[in-house]
Image (cartoon, helix red, strand yellow):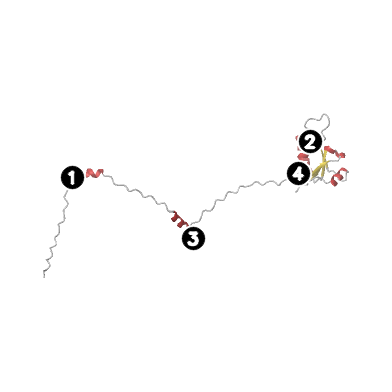
Amino acid sequence: MKRPPPPMPETFAAPRRKRALSEEERVLWESVAKQIKPLRKKPRAAKAPSAAAVEELSIAGKSTGLLKPPPAARPAKTARPDKPPPAPPLAPLGRRERSQLSRGRKEIDARLDLHGMTQTRAHRALLSFLQRASGDGLTFVLVITGKGRAAGVEPGRGVLRRQVPEWLSLPEFRNLVVGFEEAHIGHGGEGALYVRIRRSRV
């Protein structure tokens, strides 16, 4: 049998010694090193969460109670000014009451003669008269407007016969008046009105 060859002796390579740079090499290296600029790392853009991740977060938040939807903003309540109650409607006098007034069986508590007044003065006088009558608890009053057919009547004054019924239908007067009817001929006929007063509430 052949014997295996003897192992080769291990050889160790001697470490290389660094050679010192010459003066020219050192100057050249320094000039090159000054011109070199370090590379800047670009900041990584934050990745937007995917739709699936957002959905998972919302489901997890709802199940744990951590994520709660913000409360809906409630519109501010605007203070509504208190509206006065509507004036009650007018009610015509009954036949029996009108008949009793015309025959004197019902007493007329007060009278107001607007004949010859201007519209402005008549309106003011009528409102003041009815306010006093309501405050005093009167029931029936007679308002004389005049027929407006007399010769020589100043223009604008003969219209009271038409204006007074219109005034009595206004809200400011309906709070004072229950109703009205044309008076009997003995109390002025077409030129006067029976007015039923609405008593004031204390």
Q: What element carries label 1?
A: helix
Who's the residue at 76% across and 34% down the image?
119
Q: Earlier in the sequence, mark 2 or mark 1?
A: 1
CA separation in Å, label 4 and label 2: 18 Å
Q: Quadrant of residue 116?
A: top right
Q: What element carries label 2?
A: helix
Q: What element carries label 3?
A: helix
Q: Earlier in the sequence, mark 4 or mark 3?
A: 3
Tell me the residue that label 4 is attached to: 174
* Mark 1 and mark 4 residues within 8 Å of each other at the beta carbon: no
Tell me the residue that label 3 is attached to: 63
Who's the residue at 49% across and 58% down the image?
62
Q: Which of marks 4 and 2 is nearer the N terminus?
A: 2
CA separation in Å, label 4 and label 3: 66 Å
Q: Which of marks 2 and 3 is in front?
A: 3
Q: Is mark 4 on a helix, strand or loop?
A: helix
* Amino acid bearing label 4: Arg
Tell me the residue that label 1 is attached to: 25
